[in-house]
Image (spheres, rainbow, N blue to C red):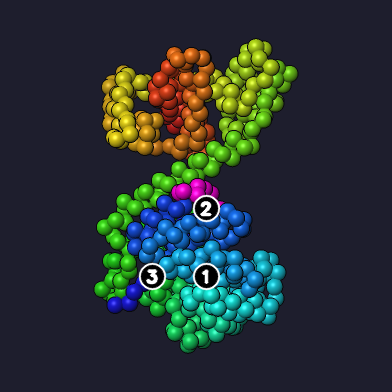
Amino acid sequence: MKKIRISDVTMKQTAQGFSLSFKEKIELAKLLDRLGTDLIELEGIRNPRIDSLRIKSIAAAVENSTVAVPVDLNPDSVSAVWLALQQAKHPRLQVCASVSAVQMEYLFHRKPDAMLDAISKTIAACRTVCEDVEFVADDATRSESAFLQQAVTAAMESGATTVTLCDTAGTMLPAEFALFLQDLYKAVPALSEVTLGVSCANTLSMADACAIAAVAEGAAELKAAAYPLDGASLANVAKLLGAKADALQISCNIRLTQLSRITEQITWMCQTGKNKAALEETEQDNSGIFLTAHDDMTAVSNLVEKLGYDLSPEDTQRVYDAFRQIAEKKEQVSSKELDAIVASAAMQVPSTYQLDTYVVTSGNTISATAHIKLLKNGQPVEGVCIGDGSIDAAFLAIEKITGCHYELDDFQLQAVTEGREAMGQTVVKLRSGGKLYSGRGISTDIVGAGIHAYLSALNKILYEEEEE
């Protein structure tokens, strides 16, 4: 049976809307390695000190998967990447180049002849230090056939062991992509002597189907993501390969028994990173921003909008009135304090859910568990859930009770009084349909304050959904 290799590109997507910390990237690589992913693709080097350390750390942590890192389209860039990657048990260098006329001109600022020369020299430089070199032809499906054939031939003659063709636009149907590969095989017979890889964008929601169509035409390596944003899904592709293994006489190394559990872990990690990145961006954008008693309603409204809220004129007036009361007592009102004002003053609605009782258990030897009982229109409803900490367990229990999941955009905790019996104030911001809703809670117990704040924001969402 023919072995189909799957190359995960999740970490290369981090610039597209989510963020992972240094430790999270290492953990992600370990999970992919445990899953049986053949290749793990990393971002290249932009900051030499930080990125080199990242590549070295991941390379050392991965036991079985090949670790692939791109080099710039310049022979001089190879040594820096190889220095960081060379300790990997299975290293790969990638040479990525646009082969469509538009991208060549505007992304690489090269004419066709100069592009061919750069491809040949860079791949040759990679082969002097690494046996596994991949040529990635970006935007291949929109390139001129003659030039694509020249580029692929030049890459193979220079030592590329894998040639990957990308449908960057994602506009091909499976049959069209299959025909595209058939024509290229006929025009460049030597292509059958190297590993053919494919990468498909998911513009038409056809990335998974196109990848399987490519396998039927001879492709032996597929780019996919455990947390897909605009490409093939690793989970879907692995399941399709498993289902069609006998019909296509193929196999892959993905451990299907662990697939669901590990991809759920990765999804949770990436979504947490996305929320964290949004929070860090908000804090950075608004650090040092404050209002005073001299600011008018327009200034307050502008900052409220910058914080992400879309308030009605009535709620804007309520927020401004509450702001004026606080501004008269202190010199400055910070953006975080304005968050709390919005949470307490804007969109006050009847409570669909009210907190009745809650019990949370946690410790360093047990998982945090929350048992919460709510009153829905006076009727008791309850749920129990395990989470990553007391707050997470409590919020998950509420989601289980209500059957509603909304993106947690922000969670703020502030002390409003001093001493051992200090009152804690929390602000929870939930996002639904692109709109931000905030709730505020106060209690001597952090978890209790968080639950009250979460319910306050949740009730606002439910009230507006019912009105619509």
Is 258 included in the stretch rendered in magenta?
A: no
Name the residue that disc number 1 marks: 93
Q: Nearer the viewer, residue 101 or 86?
A: 86
Mark 2 or mark 1, whichever is nearer to me: 1
Residue 405, horizontal then vertical, whole percent:
39, 37
Is residue 346 in view? Answer: no
Q: Is residue 17 magenta?
A: yes
Q: Which residue is mark 2?
A: 14
Which amino acid, mark 3? Answer: Arg
Query: How far apart in space, not on screen, are marks 2 and 3 (Cα)?
Result: 23 Å
Query: Magenta region: which residues?
Result: 15-24
**Residue 47 location in percent, x, y?**
62, 56
Q: Quadrant for the N terminus, please.
A: bottom left
Location of mark 3 (residue): 5
Any mark on residue 437, and which?
A: none
Mark 3: secondary structure: strand
Using a 10 Å C-alpha cutoff, classify the residue at mark 1 as few (fewer than 14 neighbours), some (14 to 19) or many (20 or more).
many
Q: Quadrant for residue 168, please give it.
A: bottom right
- What x and y, as percent, mark residue 186? 48, 86
Does residue 439 sit above or below 404 in this rendering?
above
Label 2 with label 3: CB-CB less than 8 Å: no
Whichever of callouts 3 and 1 sits on the residue coming sooner in the sequence is 3
Of labels 2 and 3, earlier in sequence is 3
Residue sitting at x 40%, y 78%: 218
- The tally of labels here is 3
Please identify the quarter of the rendering in which residue 398 is found: top left
How far is the residue under mark 2 from the one under mark 1? 20 Å
